[in-house]
Every structure is written in C-alpha cells, then in structure tokens.
Amino acid sequence: MLTPDEITLAYQLLLGRKPENPELAQTLLAEHGSLEDLRQHIMGLSEFAKLANKFAEPAKPALRHPFGLPAIPVEVDCSQKLLDRMFLRIAKEWQFLGESNPYWSVITQPAYDLLEFEKNRDQFYSSGKHTADIFLASLRRCRINPNELKSCIDFGCGVGRVSGHLASIFSKVIAVDISQAHLSLAAEYAKQSNINNIEFVHADRIESVLTLPKVDAILSVITLQHNPPPVINWLIENLLTLLNPGGVAYLQLPSYRNGYLFEVERYLNTPETKGLEMHFLPQDYIFRAITNSGCICLEVREDTAVGDEYNMLSNSFVIKRPA
C-alpha cells in the first residue's frame, strides 16, 4: 500500500512539483492503491504528456564553423601611410565610444550601458578575473610558470577591466589603449582600487607601439578584432617583438567570417562610422606574422569571443619568444 509521502514523491519525480494540495494525495491514495495504478494515473495527465513531448524532441547540437568553406579575400600588405590612415580612423571611433558609452563598448551588454552601469559596476570589473584566469591557465598548460614573468602589457586595456586583475599577478603592468577617454576611466578605477603598479599608455599613433618597453608577457583579447586586417597584421608582428627572450603572449584573434572580404582602398573610401567595427585576419596571415616576429606558436584554440560560431571563427593563440 502506498503512503501520502510516496505519492508526493512520485509527483515530484514525474511532474516536477508536489500535488496541488494534501487532500489530493489522500484522494489518490484511496483511488490508486498500487504503484502501477498511480503511475498510469500520472502518465495519463495532459501535463505529463507535454513534458514527455518536450523530452522526445531531438537535442539541437551547437553549430560549429563548417570545414568546407573557401578562403576569404583579405588584403593585408599596404604602405605605412595607409596604415596610419586606418589607425587614425579607428582611433576616432574609439575616442567617440569612450566619451559616449565606454563600458558598453568593452562588453556590449545592456547592463553596461552608461545609464545602467553604476548598479552593475562591481559585476563588470569582477568579470575581468575570468580573462586573467584563462590567460594563466593557458600558460600553465604550455608548461610556462607565470611566477617567472614579472611584466605584462595589457594591449587594448579599455577601462581597466582586466588590468586590475593582472596587477595582482605581475610586478608591472603596462595598460595600453587607443582611446584616451577609456584610459582616463581605467586610471581612475586603479586609483580608487589602490592599485599602484599599472602604467597607462595612450597609443594615439600606430608607431606608439614601437616605443613600448620590452616585457615578459602580452595579453590582448577582444581588441585586435576591431582593427582592419592590415593593422591587425602589423600589430601582431610589432607587439611580439616587445617580448623578452622566453616571454609569452596570449592573443585572441577572429580569423574567419562567412562572406567577409577586405580591400584597403574600398575601406578607406567608405564613410566613417561611430560604431564597433569587426574584422578578420585569416590564420595563414596570423602564423606568418608570428614567424616574422621571430616567435613560435605553442597553442591555438577556438574560442567564443565573437559568438555566432556557425558564421564566424575566433582563435586564441599562445605565442612564445624562444629564450
């Protein structure tokens, strides 16, 4: 003979809820004294049928980027004059974003819109720890001891979301950004947080990279993708030359989008925007830039930095300068 508690448990297991009221359990006990009777009763409910239909639906696997796609036409090599023009265009866009909606421009979520930001400030800055943790995990996976690395460039530091966490790992952090508006907020956050080992550098010209100091580590995520492919290519090559012997870089780079193409002259003749540009550099160019810098790639992983994994592909690279 069933008990009221067993009837309640059956409802919880099969329907995900308790009976509507204690009296129902007593009624069911009187009408369905055996386990088989109770099972048939519950399975005959329309509520159970809806649940059964839901579970019967085939699982929808996450779509991954197809393997059979053609190369995307991307122009990479161009003159220094054209590189300067492209970099200046991006700088103007990011200065505008830094002045109008700085936190949203870093992570494009409604919670980080300037009107909503203050109540989500702690969450925003705490999220930078995940990026720092992934960085450290990748180093350890490649048998690199983070404790032996003393200095780090955070390239594309934005408002300092990740820089503050890097400052607890490295003795010296150089936080670099194209937007002075973003940098000012990053410096203010560091001051309020009593973080004193970050140097903030405004890269207002592409050649500014060449004046940065040699370091043991470089981190750049959700940054290079907002530059045209020739600029991305130039930045990879020249950033990696800043690594000390044995130094390591972690770079996140989008490498493919279905239907994407890039031509320098066409790009420079299109109207400037005030939004977030998204660009892609094919992997063969990325590996060429790594080789040209005298470095080697230790690891490359697909990541989810750009979303929509069926149409776009993003990779994270661990790169080392030989000792």
Image (spheres, helix red, strand yellow):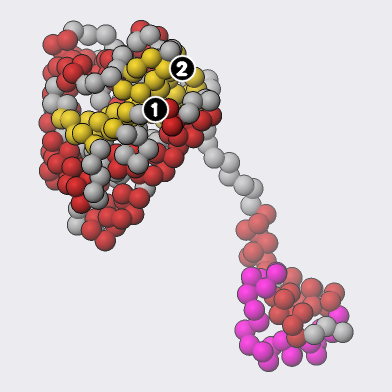
Count of all numbered marks drawn on residues in the image:
2
Q: Above or below — where is 124 with respect to 174?
A: below
Based on the picture, tell me whether residue 13 belongs to the magenta stretch.
yes
The answer to whether 2 appears left or right of 166 in the picture is: right
Q: Give the CA distance from mark 1 to mark 2.
A: 18 Å
Q: Residues within 10 Å of mark 1 (few under 14, many from 20)?
A: some
Q: Main secondary structure of the magenta part?
A: helix
Q: Position of residue 280 (x, y in %)?
A: 34, 23
Q: Which residue is mark 1?
A: 149
Residue 122 rendering spot, x and y as whole percentages = 31, 55
In magenta, the rendered stretch is 12-34
Rendered residue at 31%/49% (across/down): 125
The disc, 1 or 2, on the residue closer to the chain's N-terminal end is 1
Q: Residue at x 34, y 18 (%)?
A: 243
Which one is nearer the viewer's eye here, 323 or 61?
323
Q: Between 64 and 158, which is closer to the camera in this rendering?
A: 158
**Where is mark 2, residue-wise?**
297
Could one spot residue 256 in this view of the protein? Answer: no
Crowding around mark 2 (Cα neighbors within 10 Å: few <14, some 14 to 19, many 20+) is some
SS for dot 1: loop
Q: Quadrant of residue 123?
A: bottom left
